[in-house]
Image: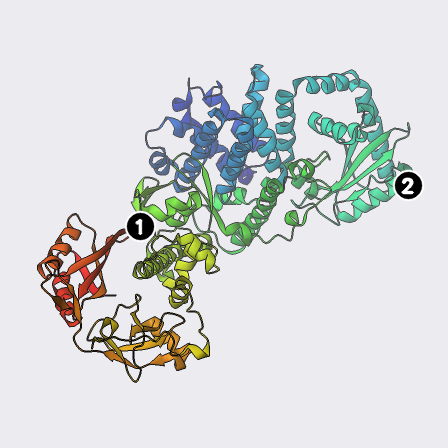
Amino acid sequence: MPGATQVSQDAVAPVARARAFAEPLLSGQCLDTGEDALVHADGVSAILAGIGAAPAMQAAAYLVYAGDFLNKPEEVVTKAFGESYASLVMHTRRLVQIQRAAREARVEAAQRSEQTERVRKMLLAFSRDLRVVLLRLASRLQTLRYFAASKRECPQSLAAESQQVFAPLANRLGIWQIKWELEDLSFRFMQPQAYRDIAKALLETRVVREQSIEAARHALHEDLAAFGLQAQVQGRPKHLYSIHKKMRGKHLALERVFDLRALRVIVPTVADCYAVLSRLHEKYKPVEGEFDDYIARPKPNGYQSLHTVVLGADGRAMEVQIRTAAMHEHAEHGVAAHWAYKEAGARGYAGVSAAGEFEDQVAQARKAVLRQLLAWERDFVEGDIQSSVAEDGAGLIAKRQSPAASGETAPGAFDERIYVFTPQASIVELTAGATPIDFAYAVHTDLGHRCRGAKIDGVMVPLNTPLKNGQTVEITAIKEGGPSLDWLNAELGFLQSQRSRTKVRAWFNALAQRQTIARGRESVEKLLQREGKTAIKLEDLAGRLGFKNADALFEVVGKDEYSLRNIELLLRPPTPEPDTDELLAQRRSRGSSSAPRGGVLVVGVDSLLTNLARCCRPAPPDSIGGYVTRGKGVAIHRLDCVNFRQMADRAAERVIEVEWGGSASGPLDPKGKGRGPALYPVDVVVEGSDRQGLLRDVLEVLAKEKMNVIAVNTQSVKSARSDTAWMNFTVEVADSGRLAQVLRLLSQINGVRSARRK
């Protein structure tokens, strides 16, 4: 038939052309395992052919390994074979390189699981192109075959990775041929003694077992034919790892493993499957609890078959699988059986846009694969990989199905994630559309805050560039700093991850909180300066006010949510309430002096004891008021004094009118030449930038203005913005009006921010 000849030639041509291209590059070259590179490529291509992969896939096996010996593999392969092959070569080579690095790294036992997880995510990262996954499965199987054939010792890390990652992946994709061989070879290298024990036991009974299986097969075939059922009956092999697992899991001796003798019946239709089952249970006695209907309830990866165990004519157990030819093809080759690569080879899949019915087939097949890969990933996350591996001969999923692994999983869930690499070959999982800033925050929060630039595959890109699967991302960061407010602008597209946005907002919230606390601390410290209570510990003050710590107090003060008056009331002891009959207590004679004590005259009252209040230190010509105290006469306050206003609010009846008397005389001077005018102490507060010599400059001005300084108290306060010097002076003046000129002169001193009367 000319048409068949043409198809055959079209199928062979890509493989032969790729091998001819790769042969001069691979000849004489060895892989890191010691295997000849060309022999390895031949083996991979043959394995792919065995599972029904398209010729284009078989050809790709040669190009992937040839790429290791080209200067610019992507460019060369693109020119010679097209972009589809170049993409496959680039992605597969990157996987190989990172897997090698993971295996060569010397890690502790506790870190090995992380290495396994890394390899698993690498496979997921490129799963949108199933060719990459199939190539890696075939390559790993060929590597294990090489170690077995050469009788060389296989690295334990490689064998463990094959058993824990690659075999379950083949299982999820339903590729039984690769799955069981990967498991058997890994079992052989990881547990050589157990492998030899089972192999030896099976070898000793092989002839008898084969004769028994053949007799049972022939008898069943004849019986079904006589019953009018067209069926193909086969003896089914049982691989060693499955036997070992069943013996260990169910604590069985080898002779108690039912499916050492196993048959497979292949029929044309589903109805024939149930007819065969009915006839089988009629002819032989079924074993209770050993029947499964995977046709009515397929396994998550699409596997369908009827499984039953019956007692044969000799009374020994025998497992039988019943399925249609289509079910058998899927069970043997899994996703490779229905993936549209065969048609794609001629129609241009991954190179030219597909259309019509073919496009729909590709989309549906891709969704099915992604659904399986997502379920496979969840197996690992839930730690159920051992229990989810099937114990049946088809190497599919276990009887126990978790909701996460069910066929109801939405295929779109997998499309919402991408996997990219750090320069150190670590895998980072991100949401689809993530940017380099999202990547930086996924690696470390501090790296995200300090991120200022990025390279994708060695090329500088804007920070709002969407990332794609398999890219290598390198972040440029400053030593110190924080994020930009622009990153939170959704229209600019800097952040796609909610986790990243949350971290940026948290940074700005923390910054605002620090500024609020600093503002509140400054206000509280100024109050303590004014009150002369700088010795009080801030933590103690906060505790007395009912706050957890000082920062909690500073925060509410900085937000203007807590009045400083509450602190003033705490610092100032309450004035004792006098008896009502002491309104005019402590009368005494004024003597012959016309000036009242302190130069104050109480209106309407003669010879009443007066005292100038220390809180506001009044001096002429300040407006003043009097407050009758218990046992100390009348306290004289400035009318603008906070304490005076509060006492007047509480006991207005104790407030009396006072005024400054005539010019009072001061004491005799040291030489006895007479008395000068009365002097009044007043408090002056100077705030300035802390610098050397500031106190000296202030005292020079006071001395020049003939201000007698009777007390000085200074303090330096360090804050985030600047260092502040607080200076409190008590000076004597005859007239407070004279003080205004002195304060103006003090304010003109370099570094002085303010000078005021307290």
Q: Which amino acid does label 2 sit on?
A: Glu
Q: Is residue 689 left or right of residue 231?
A: left
Residue 694 visible? The answer is yes
Q: Residue at x 61, y 28 (%)?
A: 182
Residue 628 lies in what quarter of the image? Answer: bottom left
Mark 1: secondary structure: loop
Instruction: Give the mark nearer the N terminus: 2 vs 1.
Output: 2
Residue 4 image label: none
Q: Is residue 182 above or below residue 468?
A: above
Q: Position of residue 601 (x, y in %)?
A: 25, 78
Where the N terminus falls, by quadrant? top right
Q: Nearer the viewer, residue 65 or 233?
A: 65
Looking at the image, residue 141 lies above or below residue 397: above
83 vs 141: above or below: below
Q: Say which residue label 2 marks.
A: 282
Identify the residue at image location x=61%, y=30%: 163
Q: In which quarter of the image is residue 336?
A: top right
Residue 238 in sight here: no
Q: Dot 2: what SS?
A: helix
Residue 754 horizontal/vertical position (percent) = 20, 62
Task: Give the amino acid type for the residue marked by disc 1 in the picture.
Answer: Pro
Q: How far apart are marks 2 and 1 (CA)?
A: 72 Å
Q: Which residue does the numbered mark 1 point to in the structure image?
A: 462
Q: State the residue lying farthest toward the front.
A: 592
10 Å crowding of disc 2: few (<14), some (14-19), many (20+)? few
Verify CB contact (< 8 Å) between mark 2 and mark 1.
no
Residue farthest toward the bottom in the current orientation of the protein: 604
Relative image position of residue 600 (x, y in whole percent): 25, 75
- Nearest to the observer: residue 439 or residue 32: 439
In the foreground, 412 or 220 = 412
